[in-house]
């Protein structure tokens, strides 16, 4: 600007000197224009020369210097914006100081929260270990309980069988007792008739001895039955006691299982609380990491004012795209923002780079580049609906990739019966053309997670034209050639036009 100002002063002086010389020369020749006297004619020519000097100077500066042209067109507005920006800068400086204090305080709180988070993670691991151990103990207790229930059922069945045997023995003892009573009555009858039957004494004596022996045997058998009955009653008592102990043990195991289930539910609630403390997100994702929001191309040689305005427009476009996907502004009203970065300098000092500093760096890199570049705004992390989107701005070279009419790729169509030329064309579009464009340097667009990056746009008219060319496929085989419809740079969407030739004619056409 200093050099241009100096040139403007020199040019004004030269033109003024030339106008003065011309006026004196014309005054000496005493020329007359428009019926004026020679003196006034010289004054008019000198005045017009001065006006021409100013007009030529302003026109030259406007054509040569873009900043001067911007000043001429928007000078008052720039001054008002400058004063407004100075006031805003002063206010932002105060806010920045307050924010830095808040950041330092929040950094301290973040350190404390990280320590608490680490402690909570350790506690969660310990609780998970305890939960696994308790689950293993509960599984063992349930296995033992099933074994005890199986033994209890077996013992219950055995007690039932022994009870049946005991009942049978009781019935048999009662029968023997009845027989013993009958025999005793017969003995008494024999003793009463012994005096009467003296002549039969020897026979009766032998019978009495035999009956006495049988009675002794019956008494011995009765005693054995009494002993067996006592043993059965003792065994029944032991089984009843064992059954009672098993019932008590089963009750205790059920109480332990209930207590452990209650403890397990408590541990699950504690784990749920811990998961809430570590802020697990359950909202749907609005913008995924790496998704492109917008891209802006910058040609070489733009002024600083123009580049700055384009960067502002770029952030507005990205914010509008993020709003359409469900993002919402933060407390500062920003829907998209460039997160602060901590950079370590060569001296070891750490410097925090704000969004404004990042944009200034991007502006400097664009201005320093001597070739066209493109800026792509993409999301840094996954962002839930209702939250602002952190973004990053990456710069890429934007050279001319394809000229208008340049061939991009070609393929051979099989038009025989049973084949589908249109499906072959679609596969050609999605395969060879896309791969060739990316390899040539076209920057693909990633507009949704899981979707394949795209390199171009295809409207309905082009698709209908392709379908018509496929229907009119000449011969059994034909060559489909894809060409660029217009000059295409690395950041532009690829627009195509197609040509279908017979296979025989395509060889000569290619030659």
Image (cartoon, rainbow, N blue to C red):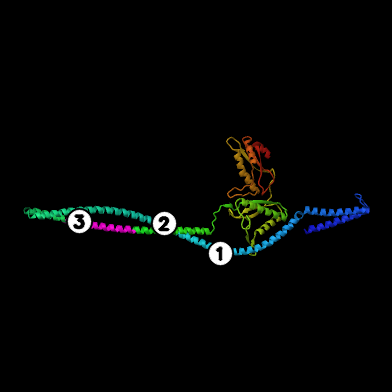
Along the viewing direction, whichever of 210 and 75 lies nearer the viewer: 75
Q: Provide the residue designation for mark 3.
A: 222
Can residue 350 be seen from the camera position used here?
no
Q: Is disc 3 placed on a helix, strand or loop?
A: helix
What is the residue that sits farthest to the left in this orientation? 199
Along the viewing direction, whichever of 100 and 3 lies nearer the viewer: 100
Can residue 156 be seen from the camera position used here?
yes
Query: What residue do we see at 75% from left, 54% from top?
Result: 74
Query: What residue do we see at 60% from left, 49% from top?
Result: 448
Per the rendered image, the range of residues in magenta is 216-245
Report x, y in % for residue 243: 32, 57
Query: How far is mark 2 from mark 1, CA to CA?
Result: 40 Å
Report x, y in % for residue 41: 90, 52
Q: Provide the residue designation for mark 2.
A: 139
Report which quarter residue 467 is drawn in.
Answer: top right
> On the rendered image, what quadrant is the N terminus found in?
bottom right
Query: How far is mark 1 from mark 3, CA to CA?
Result: 89 Å
């Amino acid at each position: 600007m200093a050099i241009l100002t100096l040139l403007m002063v020199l040019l004004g002086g030269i033109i003024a000197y030339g106008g003065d010389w011309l006026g004196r020369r014309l005054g000496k020749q005493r020329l007359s224009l428009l019926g004026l006297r020679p003196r006034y004619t010289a004054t008019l020519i000198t005045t017009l020369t001065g006006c021409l000097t100013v007009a030529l100077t302003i026109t030259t500066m406007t054509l040569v210097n873009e900043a001067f042209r911007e000043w001429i067109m928007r000078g008052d507005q720039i001054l008002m914006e400058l004063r407004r920006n100075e006031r805003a800068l002063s206010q932002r400086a105060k806010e920045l100081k307050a924010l830095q204090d808040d950041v330092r305080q929040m950094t301290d709180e973040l350190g404390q929260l990280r320590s608490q988070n680490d402690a909570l993670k350790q506690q969660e691991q310990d609780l998970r270990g305890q939960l696994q151990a308790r689950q293993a103990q509960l599984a063992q207790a349930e296995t033992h309980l099933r074994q005890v229930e199986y033994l209890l059922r077996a013992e219950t069945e055995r007690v039932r069988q022994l009870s049946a045997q005991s009942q049978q023995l009781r019935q048999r003892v009662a029968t023997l007792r009845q027989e013993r009573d009958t025999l005793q009555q017969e003995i008494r009858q024999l003793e009463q008739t012994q005096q009467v039957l003296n002549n039969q004494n020897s026979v009766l004596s032998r019978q009495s001895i035999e009956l006495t022996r049988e009675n002794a045997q019956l008494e011995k058998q009765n005693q054995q039955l009494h002993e067996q009955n006592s043993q059965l009653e003792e065994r029944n008592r032991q089984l009843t006691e064992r059954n009672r102990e098993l019932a008590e043990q089963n009750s205790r195991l059920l109480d332990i299982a209930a207590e452990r289930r209650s403890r397990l539910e408590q541990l699950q609630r504690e784990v749920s609380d811990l998961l809430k403390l570590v802020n697990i997100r359950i909202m749907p994702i609005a913008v995924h990491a790496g998704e492109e929001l917008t891209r802006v191309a910058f040609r070489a040689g733009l002024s600083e004012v123009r580049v700055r305005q384009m960067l502002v427009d770029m952030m507005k476009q990205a914010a509008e795209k993020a709003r359409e996907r469900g993002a919402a502004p933060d407390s500062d009203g920003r829907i998209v923002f460039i997160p602060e970065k901590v950079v370590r300098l060569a001296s070891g000092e750490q410097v925090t780079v704000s969004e404004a500093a990042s944009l200034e760096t991007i502006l400097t890199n664009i201005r320093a580049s001597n070739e066209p570049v493109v800026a792509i705004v993409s999301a840094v992390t996954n962002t839930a609906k209702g939250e602002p989107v952190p973004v990053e701005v990456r710069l890429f070279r934007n050279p001319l990739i394809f000229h208008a009419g340049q061939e991009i790729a070609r393929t051979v169509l099989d038009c025989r019966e049973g084949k589908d030329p249109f499906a072959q064309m679609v596969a050609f579009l999605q395969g060879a053309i896309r791969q060739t464009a990316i390899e040539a340097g076209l920057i693909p667009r990633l507009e949704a997670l899981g979707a394949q990056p795209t390199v171009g746009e295809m409207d309905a008219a082009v698709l209908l034209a392709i379908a018509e060319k496929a229907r009119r496929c000449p011969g059994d085989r034909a060559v489909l050639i894809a060409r660029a419809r217009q000059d295409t740079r690395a950041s532009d969407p690829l627009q195509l036009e197609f040509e279908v030739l017979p296979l025989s004619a395509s060889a000569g056409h290619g030659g």
